[in-house]
Amino acid sequence: MPSFDIVSKVDPQTLENAVNTAKKELQTRYDLRDTKGGIELDKKANTIQLSSENSMRVKALEDILLARVVKQGIDGTALDFTDEEQASGALVKKTVKVRAGIDKDTGRKISKAIKDAKLKVEVQMQDEQVRVSGKKIDDLQAVIALLRRTDIGQPLQFVNMK
C-alpha cells in the first residue's frame, strides 16, 4: 500500500548559516553597529537568543534574522517569535524557538484537515511525524496538494513516498 510521511524539519547547518549571516549584517548596519548584545544560536536547546538595549532594536534583530532565514530557504513559520521579552540588567532579551517535529496538536490539525476532505486514506501519528497511506497514489498526491493549500502554522515536508 503506497504511503508517505509528513515531517517538519529544519536543517541545522542551514539555520547556522542564516544566523551567521544575520550576525555579519548586524555588524555592518549603521543604526545597529554599536549595539550591545546580538544574536546567539543554541544548537542543543534549538533556540536563538536576541538581545539589545531596547525592544525597538530587538524588533530590528527579529527582522534581520527572519530575512536571512527566508533567504537561506527555510520557511519563516519555522521560527516561533511568541516568547515575551525579558529585561536583564541593561539588555532586553528575547528567545526565538525553532520548531522541529510535529507535536500532537499539529498532528490533530493535519488529521482533521485530511478527514474533512473525505479522501480514502489512513492517517497515523508516529512520534514527530504523520504517516498517510492509501490504495492509490493519486489520493496521496491529493493529500499533499491539500496540505500545501492549508495553513497549519508550521512548515511541512513530505518524505518517504513509497
Image: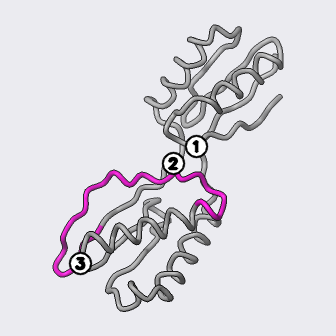
Q: Quadrant of residue 86?
A: bottom left
Answer with mark 3 or mark 2, whichever residue precedes in sequence. 2
Measured as percent of width and height from the top left, residue 97 is found at 42, 55
For numbered disc 2, what is the local secondary structure? helix
Q: CA distance from mark 1 to mark 2?
A: 6 Å
State which tag comes first along the sequence, 1 or 2. 2
**Residue 58 position by quadrant:** bottom left
Q: Amino acid at mark 1?
A: Pro
Q: Position of residue 113 (x, y in %)?
A: 55, 19
In this view, which residue lies farthest toward the bottom?
34
> Disc 1 marks which residue?
155
Residue under the image location 58 percent in, 69 percent down:
18
Residue 62 vertical placement versus 136 (above, below)? below
Residue at x 45%, y 68% (from the top left corner): 42
Give the distance between the C-alpha atoms of the residues marked 3 and 2, in whole angstroms.
26 Å
Q: Which residue is mark 3?
A: 91
Q: Which residue is mark 2?
A: 77
Comparing 113 with 54, the one in front is 54
Residue type at numbered disc 3: Leu
Is disc 3 placed on a helix, strand or loop? strand
Q: Is residue 157 above or below residue 70?
A: above
Q: Nearer the viewer, residue 115 or 57?
A: 57
Q: Quadrant of the N terminus?
A: top right
Magenta residues? 70-93
* Mark 1 in CB contact with mark 3 (< 8 angstroms): no
Magenta-colored stretch includes residue 86: yes
Q: Residues within 10 Å of mark 3 (few under 14, many from 20)?
A: some
In percent of width and height, residue 101 lies at 54, 43
Label 1, secondary structure: give it. Answer: loop
Q: Amino acid at mark 2?
A: Thr
